[in-house]
């Protein structure tokens, strides 16, 4: 049942090449230049003309929502707010005519996300779902939606569902941008081609497994970890930290790298490893300075870089190289080494990675 893997989590990490491909299958055809999302056909107009998009989700799905915020703003020029479903539902949120709510959930059963959707619907919003489980409560409550088709996710820590959510959200953002003409036809086609290349790039990251195992051995006894990234890699930092804390029980924090100087920098010493996600994108130079600041304070750094980076290896303690892609799709690739890092550290610490203490696969309580 685990297909030769020791744990479901590892199996599901390795399934991502396939699950991202499955998620695009029958929807995206770069050669033909087509992107079809039948699931949101009836409410497509609402999305195209939305004044604002409100994304509601919890946990890892909320991190996918943060990436989607950047995608919708960059590609489709629609303002986006990303809300923890649990906060949104207990406020008295302002929902205006013309707002579209997108609920993201792997299980489709998360109580807080369901309640946030009900609230939004009762105030007249159109609610679209991005779910993995077909026929789940969230899928049924949505007006329409797009399934992630990642296949059953057994490990409590979400891995392949996250990258499939990013794939679906990228497709929705690109399709919306195409209709709104906020992306040129040429750029749109380039993005379709690049999205098709993501499964192969994810597969390349599996070659890092041995190196990450060695790094995990050196850092497995740390009591705290900091994860830093900027732009599209900021949500990846949050996700890397969440993966580590939920399965290895090591305290980890994710921060936007530039916020480090507003507080967390006080924590830096030899005892506090810092994981940077510093791929070659528009914030690269700034993140390099943040790495230097950590090194100057005696911190130990592990850095996810773009293949061929010549600068960071000179300052970092460890680097892991991932293939190059555009800024928007980098999270699907850069999260993979962080999933592997948390997995190996947790296994080395003797933790039950598939069923961490205190956690359930679907959180049906409020
Ligand atoms: C993290 C994790 C949780 C879930 C969260 C939302 O690995 O599994 O943080 O992401 O409970 O669950 P869904 O996506 O099922 O609504």
Image (tube, rainbow, N blue to C red):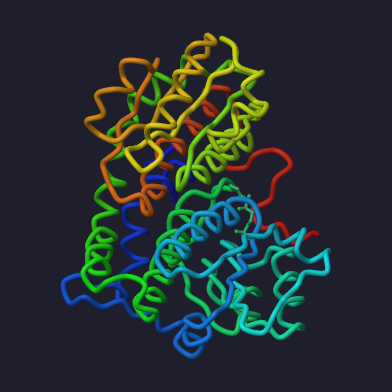
| Residue 108 rendering spot, x and y as whole percentages | 62, 68
In the rendered view, would you say 162 is above or below 125? above
In the rendered view, would you say 247 is above or below 327? above
| Residue 306 rendering spot, x and y as whole percentages | 29, 35
Query: Residue at coordinates 74% horizontally, 65% vertically from top-left?
Result: 111
Residue that extends furthest to the left in the rendered view of this protein: 31
In the rendered view, would you say 358 is above or below 344? below
**Is residue 100 rendered to the left or right of residue 10?**
right
**Is residue 56 rendered to the left or right of residue 32?**
right
Q: Nearer the viewer, residue 304 or 132?
A: 304
| Residue 138 rendering spot, x and y as whole percentages | 64, 73
Query: Residue at coordinates 25% horizontally, 66% vertically from top-left?
Result: 187
**Is residue 164 rendered to the left or right of residue 54?**
left
| Residue 286 rendering spot, x and y as whole percentages | 43, 32
In the rendered view, would you say 103 is above or below 11? below
Q: Quadrant of residue 125?
A: bottom right
């Amino acid at each position: 049942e685990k297909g030769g893997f020791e744990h479901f989590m590892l199996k599901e990490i390795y399934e991502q090449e396939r699950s991202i491909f499955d998620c695009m299958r029958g929807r995206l055809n770069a050669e033909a230049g087509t992107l079809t999302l039948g699931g949101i056909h009836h409410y497509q107009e609402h999305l195209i003309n939305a004044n604002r998009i409100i994304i509601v989700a919890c946990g890892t799905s909320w991190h996918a929502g943060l990436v989607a915020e950047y995608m919708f703003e960059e590609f489709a020029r629609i303002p986006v707010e990303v809300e923890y479903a649990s906060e949104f539902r207990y406020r008295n949120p302002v929902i205006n005519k013309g707002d579209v709510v997108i609920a993201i959930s792997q299980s489709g059963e998360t109580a807080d996300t369901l309640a946030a959707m009900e609230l939004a619907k009762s105030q007249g919003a159109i609610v679209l779902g991005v779910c993995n489980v077909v026929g789940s409560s969230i899928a049924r409550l949505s007006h329409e939606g797009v399934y992630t088709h990642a296949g059953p996710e057994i490990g409590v820590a979400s891995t392949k569902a996250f990258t499939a959510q990013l794939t679906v959200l990228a497709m929705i953002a690109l399709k919306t941008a195409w209709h709104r003409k906020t992306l040129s036809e040429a750029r749109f086609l380039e993005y379709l081609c690049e999205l098709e290349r993501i499964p192969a790039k994810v597969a390349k990251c599996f070659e890092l497994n041995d190196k990450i195992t060695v790094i995990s051995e050196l850092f497995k006894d740390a009591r705290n970890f900091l994860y830093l990234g900027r732009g599209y890699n900021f949500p990846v930092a949050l996700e890397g930290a969440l993966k580590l804390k939920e399965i290895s029980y090591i305290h980890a924090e994710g921060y936007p790298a530039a916020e480090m100087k507003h507080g967390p920098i006080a924590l830096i010493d030899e005892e506090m490893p810092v994981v940077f996600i510093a791929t070659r994108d528009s914030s690269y130079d700034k993140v390099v300075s943040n790495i230097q600041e950590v090194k100057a304070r005696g911190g130990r750094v592990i850095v996810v870089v773009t293949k061929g980076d010549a600068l960071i290896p000179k300052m970092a303690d460890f680097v892991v190289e991932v293939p190059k892609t555009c800024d928007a799709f980098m999270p699907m690739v850069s999260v993979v080494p962080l999933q592997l890092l948390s997995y190996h550290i947790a296994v080395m610490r003797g933790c039950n990675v598939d069923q961490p203490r205190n956690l359930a696969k679907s959180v049906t309580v409020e």
